Each structure stands twice: as structure tokens, then as C-alpha cells.
Amino acid sequence: MSNTEHHLKRIQDKLQQLLKQYAALQKENSRLIQELASAQQKIAAYQINTDELKQQLSVLKLNTGEMSEADKKEFEKRINGYLKEIDRCIALLGE
């Protein structure tokens, strides 16, 4: 085998090795993208759950009379925001 053929064989072997590594990295990247999407979905679900629990806590505090003035004002702001959103929806439906 000549020196040139030996170099070509070595380059070809290295190229094959790089192609295998590239395929493995693509597969790993794909798996990580799926894992990220799953984690983001879980975070969104946890955020929704947290918001619902905060609302329930506010209602419970209101019912038991344990709300501070700041909590009452925040609760009223939230209720007013909901009412404005409902009014906006009704106006859009009336058009």
C-alpha cells in the first residue's frame, strides 16, 4: 500500500468515525428537545395548578375573615379584572 493510499484510508476512517459521532449527536439532540418540551409542559401545568391553589387560598381566607387589608385589595383587584374581562367578552359577542 502506498503512502497516499494509506493517508486516504486514514482520512476515510476518520470521516466514518465523525459521521457516526454526528449521527449519535443528532439522536441525542432530538432526545433532549423532546425532554425539554416535556419539561416545559410540566412547568406550565404546575403553574396553572399553583394559580388555582392561590385562588382557592384567597377564597378560603375571604370566607374565614382572615384576609389582611392588602389581601382584600388584591382580591378586589382580581375580581374587578375578571369583571372587566367578562364585560369585554360580552361586548365582543354583541358585535
Image: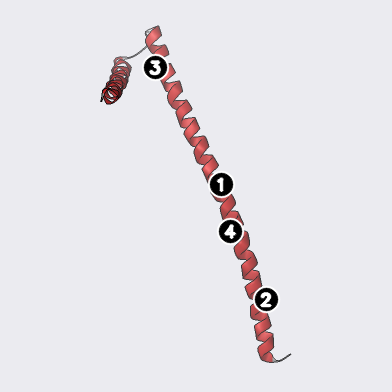
Residue 5: x and y in percent read 68, 87
- The first of marks 1 and 2 along the sequence is 2
- The first of marks 2 and 3 along the sequence is 2
How far apart are labels 2 and 4 at the CA level?
A: 20 Å
| Point 53% across, 45% down: residue | 36
From the image, tell me which residue sits under label 4. Answer: 26
From the image, tell me which residue sits under label 2. Answer: 13
Q: Name the mark nearer the viewer: 1 or 3.
A: 1
Residue 88: x and y in percent read 27, 24
Q: Quadrant of the C terminus?
A: top left
- The first of marks 2 and 4 along the sequence is 2
Residue 67: x and y in percent read 35, 13
**Element assignment for label 1:** helix
| Point 65% across, 84% down: residue | 8
| Point 65% across, 78% down: residue | 12
Query: Are the residues at dot 3 and dot 4 in contact (C-beta closer than 8 Å)?
Result: no
| Point 54% across, 49% down: residue | 33
How far apart are labels 1 and 2 at the CA level?
A: 32 Å
Tell me the amino acid under the disc marked 3: Ser
From the image, tell me which residue sits under label 1. Answer: 34
- The first of marks 3 and 4 along the sequence is 4
